[in-house]
Image (cartoon, helix red, strand yellow):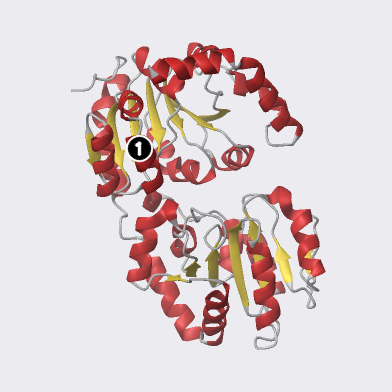
Amino acid sequence: MILALYRGLTTLGAPLITFYLRRRKALGKEDGPRFGERYGMPSHPRPSGRLIWLHAASVGESVSMLPVVERLLVDPGTSVLLTTGTVTSARLMHERLPPGAIHQYVPVDRLPWVRRFLDHWRPDLALWAESEFWPNLLTEAAGRGVPLILLNGRISDRSFARWRRQPRLIGKLLASFVLCLGQTPQDAGRLAELGARRVACRGNLKFAALPLPVDDGVLRRMAAGIEGRPRWLAASTHAGEEAIAGRLHRSLAPRHPGLLTIIVPRHPSRGEAIAGELAEMGLTVARRAAGQPVEAATDVLLADTMGELGLLIRLAPLVFMGKSLIGRGGQNPLEPARLGASVLFGPHMDNFAEIADRMASGGAALQVADEAVLIDAVSCRLADPALLAECGAKARAFASVEDGVLDDVMRELRPWLEPIAEGSHAPASS
């Protein structure tokens, strides 16, 4: 009943949905040259042979799926279609997807657009990352006999409470999957309780991600330009956290001469506004997107660019993960940990709760309660190189504890991969 109502609303609501999408396009939140993809209109021909469709909502999910994409492409004759929903993720995937993989924007969840998308791509297998359950996409794909598998499934406390109030809808959606792999045993248990038919947990694929890439030449040049300066990085910040970083800099600069604060906003399009906010605080800002160099008088390097987080983490031995002091959810603390940085994050790490708890309890990261504690933590580590190195080593060791997760996940996928490699459909759910 609820699914039928949803389908009715998304059908009758076409004018409103179209208006909303066009409004987003006008605001720069949609990709103008590729806008048709949101209506299910492809901008790339379907490759011949086997096609595996992998859907990931945005940046974090798509990055965690890159090792899976690379492993799938080892099989000759297999192509991978990766869909995401954000401009930022599309730009990043353009840089990082290997040959043989295609990126498209996921169609908005209206049946005519979904059907147009599926008619063109005709996937042999669909892998769905984490927790974005679009009813029309899932049920239409499953209805066409496409085996769907949930990878790294995550059900947060909030989502679990919400879905328990809609048991028939979530049960129908999860029934579309022939297999659901949870990030954690708790996620797997919740998926089973909500109606998933076949559930397992083989670890968190975020542990399988490769270290963030870097241009070694750029790294050497930038490192030489800031050599000897104490520095820290606020990564993937959200609105309000840049001001916190600015106040932290003003507080600590007298105690740490030459201090350089590096800020990487989650959304680079906010760069100009952030630079203005920091300048009003009396700070000298170098915007990387504007090509402004870091000079001796520079207080803040504002890296309002895409794809350079690997470079900037390697320049800063101390990293605070954003969206954890203001807002909710946090950002992936494994990215700096994998590169041996000392990791800090705030109290709101809902999207990485299990990882954050394990890191904090094992000394691989420090969770700070508020701005004042963050200031003290940054100052303490900058003043103690031995402590900074020890914390970084613990973080790096933690990031390697589940190195075998990708192999374990691929073993779970084998019963569905082998039949399509032989030219037939994958098996139905048992």
x, y percent for residue 363: 36, 73
Residue shown at the point (54%, 18%) measured from the top left:
10
x, y percent for residue 65: 43, 41
Question: Mark 1 — residue?
Answer: 151
Residue shown at the point (79%, 54%) measured from the top left:
272
| Depicted 400 relative to depicted 55: above or below | below
Residue nearest the viewer, comparing 28 with 427: 28
Q: Is residue 197 left or right of residue 340?
A: left
Residue shown at the point (43%, 76%) measured from the top left:
391
Q: Is residue 280 left or right of residue 375?
A: right
Residue 258 appears in the rendering: yes
| Depicted 144 relative to depicted 86: above or below | above
Residue 48 appears in the rendering: no
Kindly state the secondary structure of the residue where label 1 is placed. Answer: strand
Q: Amino acid at mark 1?
A: Leu
The quarter of the picture where the C terminus appears is: top left
- Which quarter of the figure has residue 172? top left
| Depicted 112 relative to depicted 67: above or below | above
Looking at the rendered structure, the number of numbered marks drawn on it comes to 1
Question: Few, some or many C-alpha atoms within 10 Å of disc 1 (few <14, some 14-19, many ≥20)?
Answer: many
Residue nearest the viewer, comparing 191 with 358: 191
x, y percent for residue 100: 50, 30
The quarter of the picture where the N terminus appears is: top left
Q: Residue furthest front?
A: 165
| Depicted 281 relative to depicted 160: above or below | below
x, y percent for residue 17: 63, 22
Residue nearest the viewer, comparing 252 with 224: 252
Q: Is residue 198 left or right of residue 398?
A: left
